[in-house]
Amino acid sequence: MPATPDDLLEGLAAGREEAFAALYDAYGARLFAAACGMLGSREEAEDVVQDVFVGLVQTRARLRQVENLKAYLFAALRHAAMHQMGRAKPSQSDTAEIAMPAADAGPDAEISRRLEVDLRRLPREQREVIALHIDGGLTFAEVAAVLDVSPNTAASRYRYAMEKLREAMKESQRGTV
């Protein structure tokens, strides 16, 4: 297993299978979680993560020039997700229905469902920041690099999204009382 990010990049650029395996082990779950947050679909998220890794294999020679592998991966993920959203049928996009929890699923399942619905109602730019920061584990500086915005803009989008989610959850609770 490569010892440093530079060694990992060199292994990826050389097409070494163990480098790709190490990269997947290190980032696969976070890429998938972020893709789910951006797309709202496990199936589409799987496709997008696969697209990212296929793209890495196809363009591996260029990886020697990458300065920040983590930011590069999540930028590639965002690009693939945007491409996927362009291909998606309208019923699979932001307006896709969320499955209702089973009657015996309990209040936590209902809260999760409401939160998922509210997340999908956020503007794309705010969903991206939440997905990259929370699901992807990126700092606001890294989110800013992926989205090509300032760190202050990334942090503001996150703050506005969280405010909207808090307000939506309060409204949901008022509606059920």
Image (cartoon, rainbow, N blue to C red):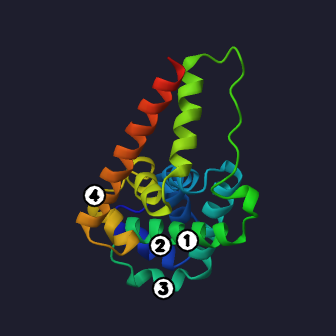
- The answer, for residue 110, to whether it is visible in the render is yes
What residue lies at 45% left-to-right and 38% top-to-bottom?
168
Which residue position is annotated with label 1?
A: 16
Q: CA distance from mark 1 to mark 2?
A: 5 Å
If you read the primary sequence from the N terminus, does the residue marked by circle 4 or circle 1 appear first?
1
* Residue closest to the eye, 3 or 166: 166
Q: Is 99 placed left or right of 80 in the picture?
A: right
Marks 1 & 2, CB-CB < 8 Å contact: yes
Extreme-left residue of the structure: 152
Residue 62, label in figure: 3
Q: Which amino acid type is shown beneath numbered disc 4?
A: Ala
Residue 83, label in figure: none
What residue lies at 33% left-to-right and 71% top-to-bottom?
145
Which residue position is annotated with label 4?
A: 155
Q: Quadrant of the N terminus?
A: bottom left
Measured as percent of width and height from the top left, residue 165 is found at: 42, 42
Marks 4 & 3, CB-CB < 8 Å contact: no
Dot 2 crowding, Cα within 10 Å, few <14, some 14–19, many 20+: many
Which residue position is annotated with label 2?
A: 11
If you read the primary sequence from the N terminus, does the residue marked by circle 3 or circle 1 appear first?
1
Q: Is 113 placed left or right of 154 in the picture?
A: right
Marks 4 & 1, CB-CB < 8 Å contact: no
What residue lies at 59% left-to-right and 25% top-to-bottom?
109
Measured as percent of width and height from the top left, residue 106 is found at: 60, 16
